Image (cartoon, rainbow, N blue to C red):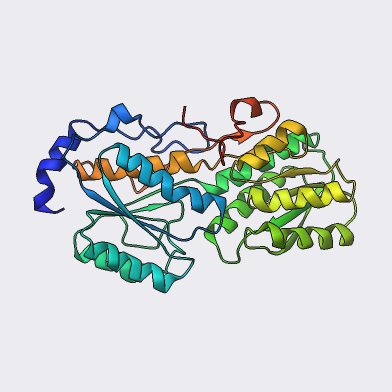
Amino acid sequence: MKLRKLTAIFAVAALTLSLAACGNKGGDTSSSSSSEDTDTKSGDSFKIGFSNCSQDTPFFANMTPIIEDYAKSKGLEVVSLNADNDTTKQNKDIQDLISQGIDVLIINPVNEDGPTAGIEACNKNDIPVITVDKNVTKGNTAWVGRDNEVMGKLVGERLIELLGGEDATGTVLEIQGTAGSTTMMNRRDGFHAALENAPGLKIVQSSYCDYDRSKAIPATQDLLQANKDVVAIFGHNDDMAIGAAQVCKEQKMEDVLVCGVDGLMEAVLKIETGEYHITSSNDPVLLGQTAVDAAIQYMAGETLDEFIDAGTVVIDTENVAEYADKDLDFATMVK
């Protein structure tokens, strides 16, 4: 920790609260503190660097302004760079942020191993590294994220209920994300674990669609043509699952239950109209705010848990009214 920041650190320490979501997995949580809880004094601040993996999905695109706006509301300076899904660029971006005098790095890594060189440079310069959303294999101080296995399992459990319980039968199509992605594997594994409780349900997987709706649409068309008795479709994110729901609508298969993960507002609003059925919240607002709060706490001298869980909640017809808001891109758990 840099000596020139000690005054700011002790000022922040007096005004920072503990993260509410630490260790709380799978529940409806509100991890981020309000602005009054964690405000820093005017003039007593530090600089945050944010390295985002990309801007190519609504989730990633929202992460940058969320972190910038929330940090600035605390009187903190933020410098943000976008890696465009390029690990070489992300490492160069981190070096650039270090040269600009950042005191904390918040990073949404392109992948677990990609930004190793940049993180090692932060370690050599005594700059704490907080990963957000995705994690890295080593070198970070804390990871602010969600348990994707729990998220997939919660969706699977709710789907079984909607299909009639453990005696449900039929084919469930699974639209897969990106090959080798930890997020994809965890969401897959959680969903599969849930469906083990309904042995009459058969899972058929698509090719990898990279969380991209335009790839999920033809993949769904192929699966529907090749499989009979399809009762449900699960997408590793809502964007792909909405593409699957579109295909079902075009083929007049409205009885197929479609579900995904992320709490994309487009999906939430479709739950209201019956065109979609289940999602698990992956609120980027709460995630980004929790990452900034973690940075504030660390700079205040507090010890962070290795994993800070921002929490999730299943959204379906029973509670959709609590989360539907056409002015938002994602369902938010921030109250």
Instruction: Residue lying at the far front in this picture: please name it.
Output: 327
- Is 292 placed above or below 34 here? below
Q: Quadrant of residue 42?
A: top left
- Is 218 placed above or below 35 here? below
Left or right: 180 as drawn, with respect to 273: left
What x and y, as percent, mark residue 180? 57, 66
Left or right: 283 as drawn, with respect to 51: right
What x and y, as percent, mark residue 227? 87, 58
Left or right: 163 as drawn, with respect to 131: right
Depth check: 161 or 124 in front?
A: 124
What x and y, as percent, mark residue 214? 70, 60
Depth check: 249 or 187 in front?
A: 249
Residue 234 visible, this orientation: no
- Is 160 placed above or below 215 here? above
What x and y, as percent, mark residue 161? 74, 34
Residue 55 visible, this orientation: yes
Residue at horizontal 56 percent and vertical 40 percent from the top: 330
Instruction: Residue lying at the far bottom in this picture: please name it.
Output: 88
Residue at horizontal 74 percent and vertical 38 percent from the top: 160
Residue at horizontal 30 percent and vertical 33 percent from the top: 18
Residue at horizontal 35 percent and vertical 62 percent from the top: 138
Depth check: 300 or 322 in front?
A: 322
